[in-house]
Image: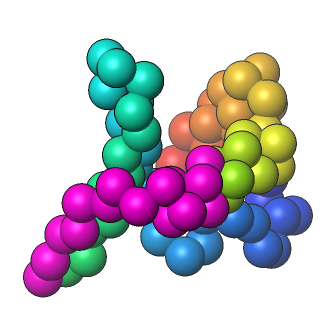
């Protein structure tokens, strides 16, 4: 995420999505003491929307590389 992006769709935690060979989607949410397998299509749809928003908010590949190189130089 750009450093100036103070809010983004991934702030509620990690998103794990899986498409099975039969094109059925599943999700997985993990906390410190538990994990939850998700098969509810409404919840999957929400997670897919959040993932799509994160992709649109994220840095480009070139900008990500540049940021990492600048961070490495600051060490």
Q: Is residue 3 left or right of residue 11?
A: right
The image's colour scheme reads rainbow
In this orientation, which residue lies closer to the viewer: 68 or 24?
Answer: 24
Position of residue 58 measured from the top left corner of the image (x, y, whole percent): 76, 44
In this orientation, which residue lies closer to the viewer: 20 or 13?
Answer: 20
> Residue lying furthest top in this view?
21
Q: Is residue 12 left or right of residue 6?
A: left
Residue occupying image coordinates x 47% and y 70%: 13
Position of residue 28 measured from the top left corner of the image (x, y, whole percent): 31, 56
- Asked if residue 74 can be seen in this view, the reply is no
From the viewer's perspective, is residue 19 above or below residue 27? above
Residue occupying image coordinates x 42% and y 39%: 25
Examine the image and state in which quarter residue 42 appears.
bottom right
Residue occupying image coordinates x 23% and y 68%: 36
Q: Is residue 41 left or right of residue 5?
A: left
> Residue lying furthest left in this view?
33
Position of residue 43 measured from the top left corner of the image (x, y, whole percent): 51, 64
Q: Reply yes or no: does residue 40 show up in magenta.
A: yes
Q: Reply yes or no: does residue 43 show up in magenta.
A: yes
- Asked if residue 51 can be seen in this view, the reply is yes
Examine the image and state in which quarter residue 20 appears.
top left
In this orientation, which residue lies closer to the viewer: 15 or 11?
Answer: 15
> Residue lying furthest bottom in this view?
33
Position of residue 74 measured from the top left corner of the image (x, y, whole percent): 62, 48
Residue occupying image coordinates x 67% and y 57%: 50
| Magenta residue span | 33-48
Q: How many marks?
A: 0
């Amino acid at each position: 995420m750009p450093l100036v992006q103070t809010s983004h769709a991934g702030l509620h935690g990690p998103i794990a999505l899986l498409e099975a060979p039969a094109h059925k989607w599943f999700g997985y949410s993990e906390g410190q003491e538990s994990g939850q397998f998700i098969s509810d299509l409404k919840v999957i749809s929400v997670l897919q929307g959040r993932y799509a928003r994160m992709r649109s908010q994220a840095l480009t590949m070139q900008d990500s590389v540049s940021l990492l190189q600048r961070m490495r130089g600051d060490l």
